[in-house]
Image: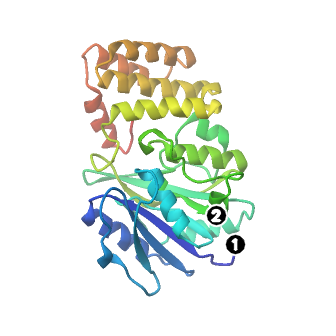
Amino acid sequence: MSVWPSVGVVIPTRDRPRLLARAIAGVVAQDYPGPVRIVVVYDRSNPDPQLCRGGDRPLDVLPNLRPAGLAGSRNTGILALDTELVAFCDDDDEWVPAKLRRQVEALRRRPQAEFATCAIEVDYGGRVTPRLAGATLIGLADLARSRMAMLHSSTFLVLRRALLDADALGMVAEDAPGSHNEDWDLLLRAARREPVVHVDEPLVRVLWGRTSMFAYEYATKMESLRWMLERHPEISTSEVGAARVYGQLACWSAASGDRRDAWRWAKAAVRSNWREPRTAIALAAVTGVISVESVLSALHRHGRGI
């Protein structure tokens, strides 16, 4: 990398102009000394040419030219850029002004690194909760054990050459069901090559709740988790990591009204790790004591999820 490498920022969007404006403003306000270019990729909607701008933070708009969804949108942006680094920002998230500078400084301290993340703060109903990782390097075992929600896609900063090389990291997985868990998949693939550099400061504000494209899409959540288990054997070989995924599958099955699958996945979670708390949530939902949605709302208020 050069001293202050050029950064291209990919913002996928779909019919959320007010949130998009806030996301763009956060990128434009970066105190980063190097060149920054923004590409807004419209997925299944018409690009707004009025957003295009020149100057120190030029912005282009594009339609998603690849498969519909977040993965295709991000890859469209990656291919449209010619920068040394690529960053992602979802259209409902907002960067702190020091975000890029702090991450590039961290990458420069570890020249072999290809991938950087940072901590987040979760905004749910106006209540803001920081989510820290408690580490500055994230390895494969860490990500197999836990999704580590603070390593949100809006925190990703990656060497573009690694993304373009199919024999290296490669681009975002477009076969991820519903483009869900494609960010966890990319993290695991990156960590296989080299630990992820992490700046443990909340430099991105993430808006949680119904603005999420996947908040209550239980079928998509389940299909993508099964896809992850098949694609990443490291998850199944981690007792804690496997139980976490089985517990999630039990919860989403219960939320979908599939009692049989909920019991099956709950048993698998207990066999892997009897301490897995999602098992209790799923069983309570199956028996009608609680609803998964009420648990989700309570957890979101504290910046957490199932």
Please say if the residues under marks 1 and 2 sit with CB atoms less than 8 Å apart: yes
Q: Secondary structure at mark 2?
A: strand
> What's under tag 2, amino acid-wise?
Leu
* Residue drawn 44% across the image and 51% down it: 67
* Residue drawn 36% across the image and 22% down it: 253
**As drawn, 80 above or below 222:** below
Residue 188 is situated, as x and y percent measured from the top left of the image, at: 61, 43
Q: Quadrant of the N terminus?
A: bottom right
Residue 49 is situated, as x and y percent measured from the top left of the image, at: 32, 76
Q: Quadrant of residue 163?
A: bottom right
Residue 115 is situated, as x and y percent measured from the top left of the image, at: 63, 57
Q: Report the front residue among 219 and 110.
A: 219
| Label ID, residue 196 | none
Q: Quadrant of the C terminus?
A: top left
Residue 148 is situated, as x and y percent measured from the top left of the image, at: 52, 43
> What's under tag 1, amino acid-wise?
Met
Which one is earlier in the sequence, the residue at label 1 or at label 2?
1
**As drawn, 275 above or below 121:** above
The residue at which mark 2 appears reads as 159
The residue at which mark 1 appears reads as 1
Q: Secondary structure at mark 1?
A: loop
Q: Report the front residue among 259 and 292.
A: 259
Instruction: For marks 1 and 2, give the CA distance.
Output: 9 Å
| Furthest residue toward bottom | 55
Q: Quadrant of residue 285?
A: top left
* Residue drawn 66% across the image and 47% down it: 191
Could one spot residue 199 in this view of the protein? no
**As drawn, 208 above or below 221:** below
Label 1, residues with CA under 10 Å away: few <14, some 14-19, many ≥20: few
Horizontal side of 207 relative to 151 (left or right) equals: left
Label 2, residues with CA under 10 Å away: few <14, some 14-19, many ≥20: many
Horizontal side of 215 relative to 200 (left or right) equals: left
